[in-house]
Image (cartoon, coloured by chain):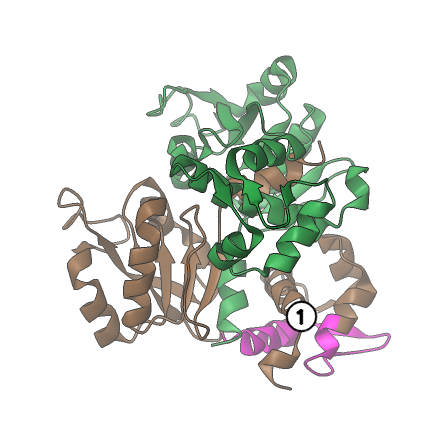
Chain colours: A brown, B green
Amino acid sequence: MSAYEIPDIVVGRLPVYLRALARMAQDGREITSSHELGERLGISSAQIRKDLSHFGEFGKQGTGYQVKFLVGQLQRILKVETEWEMALVGAGDLGHALAHYNGLVNRGFRIVAVFDNDPAKIGARLDGGLVVEDAARMKDLIRRRGVKIGMVAVPADQAQVVSDLLVEAGVRAILNYAPITISVPDEVRVQYIDPVVHLQRMTFYL
Amino acid sequence: MSAYEIPDIVVGRLPVYLRALARMAQDGREITSSHELGERLGISSAQIRKDLSHFGEFGKQGTGYQVKFLVGQLQRILKVETEWEMALVGAGDLGHALAHYNGLVNRGFRIVAVFDNDPAKIGARLDGGLVVEDAARMKDLIRRRGVKIGMVAVPADQAQVVSDLLVEAGVRAILNYAPITISVPDEVRVQYIDPVVHLQRMTFYL
């Protein structure tokens, strides 16, 4: 089935399934069920079975899912069996936290370059061993290395310019932490992380 | 109209509209249209008009929206006309970045307390002037202050325990940065920020 025939909302749930299953595998669990997974995730077991059925048959009625096998299948479907190299733009507080974030390990992603345009930050060595590069070299370095994913952690008024440069350099997926909607060509994916958007989505109900 | 009659997906778009409109207001713009807003956000103008129509009549055919007025209305709808006090749990790299994040200002939120259980971190003064408090005092301090929103920035294996404590202390909305699904009572809202979930949602299409 082509990627574009799968509803995006289903695709959005797969990483959550993978996260829970990977945790079960880490805890030594060998078998689980859509029921147990649903309980953990607050999602109905029927929904989980339906979501997974878009991609094949992964379990048998009555015997459940092999945890390790399903982890492998989801990694394949989400294309995270190997590590994607990522470029991070912005070496402020957030950039530092992202560069040090150990939650990427074994989940398919690794930051291989960090850029900033602040002379006071360029050349600084981060804990993980990365050195902050001059943003002027961004396009060239990203293109040469063939990096396809960028993380944008710059102020809102710089996010569009930075994203344009990333796209020109060949980046095809951008995780934007700047609190502004950016415009990219159709073939480029963007996801947003803005804590306030999530917070306001909750205060509505309070 | 009751909050629960509005589709949650609509509620989820309101903060994005508010963010764009607040930026327009900041830039001195007085009037906008669903068409212009849609262009900026990559959302159809019909969708925007439909979403807003759940809450009333905010513009007139042909004359568009008064930016400042619509900002005020969305702030009222999302209950962010005044500032919500928040408690942050976890004073690691991410906690530091959140405590220093200036993107909360004027958007309805303020971190008023930071907690950690690491003796090496307790007592540390953060840039904004907050002092890291002992997590053992969390329940008492949050309850006394009447804080209703918590941000969880602790390792995955501590997130459930911390969330339970927050809920016992009276917190009704949790923004969880730990890469794990947590379980809370029905009356408590949770939103998740896990960069890997967003990244994997994009690699699926690459």
Residue B99 is drawn in which quadrant?
A: top left
- In the picture shown, does residue B126 fall above or below B61? above
Place of residue B17 in the rendered image (x, y in percent of width and height, measured from the top left)? 55, 46
Q: Is residue A64 left or right of residue B76?
A: right
Q: Residue pushed farthest right?
A: A62
Question: Which residue is rendered at x = 67% and y = 72% of the image?
Answer: A7
Viewer-closest of B137 and A84: A84
Q: Is residue B84 magenta?
A: no
Can residue A88 be seen here? no
Relative height, residue B149 to residue B160 (above, below): above
Mark 1: amino acid: Val
The reply to whether residue B123 is visible in this rendering is yes
Q: Quadrant of the N terminus of chain A?
A: bottom right
In the picture, residue B59 is in which quadrant? top right
Pointer 1: residues within 10 angstroms few (<14), some, or many (20+)?
many
Chain letter for mark 1: A
Taking A117 as reference, is B123 above or below it? above
The residue lying at 68 percent from left, 33 percent from top is B164
Which element type, helix, strand or loop, lies under badge 1? helix
Please indicate whether residue A117 sits to the left or right of residue B161 in the image. left
> Residue A72's spot in the image, x, y percent?
58, 76
* Point 48% across, 50% down: residue: A193
Which residue corresponds to mark 1? A67
Q: Is residue B168 left or right of residue A162?
A: right
Q: Position of residue B198 (x, y in %)?
A: 52, 60
For the C terminus of chain A, the quadrant is: top right
Q: Which residues are magenta?
A: A51-79
Q: Is residue B98 left or right of residue B140?
A: left
Up the image or down, B12 lies above or below B153; here it is: below
Magenta stretch holds residue A62: yes
Q: Position of residue B73 (x, y in %)?
A: 62, 33
